[in-house]
Image (cartoon, rainbow, N blue to C red):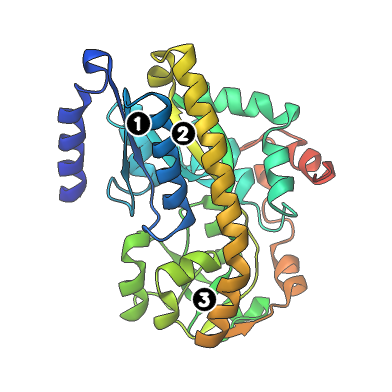
Amino acid sequence: MKKFAVVCLVLILAATTVFAQGKITIRLGHIRDTNHPTHLAALKFKELVESGSNGRIEVKVYPNSQLGDPKQMFALMQVGDLEMMYGGINTFAWVKGGEAYEITAMPFLFKDYNHMRKSLQSDFFKPVQEKAEKETGIKIININGDTAPRGLTSNRPVVKADDFKGLKIRTAASPTVLRAMQALGALPQQIALSELYMALKTGVVDAQENGAITVQSLSLFEVQKYYTKTDYIRDIETFYTTTSFWNRLSAADKDLIFKATETAGNYETELTQKQLADVYAFLKTKMTVLEPDLLSIQAKLDGIFNDYEGTKWPVGLMQKIKSIQPK
């Protein structure tokens, strides 16, 4: 908490320079390490914006949770102490007013990346986005950047639903993920991604659920024996800003930034999809890779989110997503 307070102070002191002398400074935070496609895409965004503005716009990238976890970065954005974040669309649901985005963390809902992105950019989803942006003060610039679907690593074999019972597992802070793990009998815990390696090494938790690229980039294979390819939740890295910051930009700067997010997000998607086959092959040399009994897991989760329909998100939204045809 003390570290977060120091970060806040530094950002507050820097905030006065954001629009000084016609120049703009954009501070962009994310939670991934510097080897991850998210960071490489953030650097691509920085390169494109700075070159496209002839240096008038400076982008400072803060990786590896330097500015806190997604909740903390959203809070910094809401008080004007951070201009941008590049993080999962799942995390928007963690902000008061963004609860409808909990649907993006629904297990087994999205067929693939294209299905998910097409759904979130559809006409039927626009009112959901507009309402969330109005209530949170946070604007989605672009939903773009594939991430590896979430799998499971553990120190004991986890294949079928019953294997989750009593499993101490680090999960994302999503209420949907927490409920899913509790329904399976696991014991979910919240640990910052930057602290996950030591938590697994010291036995604070026995397991975690992240994509294979994160497992490799954080060297989690050193402290976990098994990888189970559940692919149960998908996510898309998203460029967030605040409506107040966005509204102060010129139309030309908005256009430059949007185009940079499109190129950078496509770059992340390309890196992720190229890496996945190599990463899975690598993990097979370091861990025992297991194929799950998905039917038993899906059966255990059947119906446990029925009360979210019409409360967290509009009635019928899930069915519209299921019926959409991927590209």
Secondary structure of the residue carrying numbered label 2: strand
Residue 153, numbered circle: 3
Q: Residue at x 70, y 70 (%)?
A: 297
Q: Residue at x 55, y 72 (%)?
A: 279
Where on the picture, by quarter, is residue 307?
Answer: top right
Q: Tell me: residue 306, above or below residue 218.
A: above
Q: Which quarter shows the C terminus? A: top right
State which quadrant residue 73 falls in: top left
Marks 2 and 1 sit apart, C-alpha to C-alpha, by: 9 Å
121 sits to left or right of 323: left
Amino acid type at mark 1:
Met
The residue pinned by badge 2 equals: 240
Do the CB atoms of the residues marked 2 and 1 lie less than 8 Å apart?
yes
Q: Of helix, strand and loop, which one carries label 1?
A: helix
Residue 230: where, in percent of width, then height? 65, 70
Q: Position of residue 116 (x, y in %)?
A: 69, 46
User: What crowding class fits label 2: few (fewer than 14 Cα within 10 Å), some (14-19), or many (20 or more)?
Assistant: many
Chain-order first, disc 3 or disc 2: 3
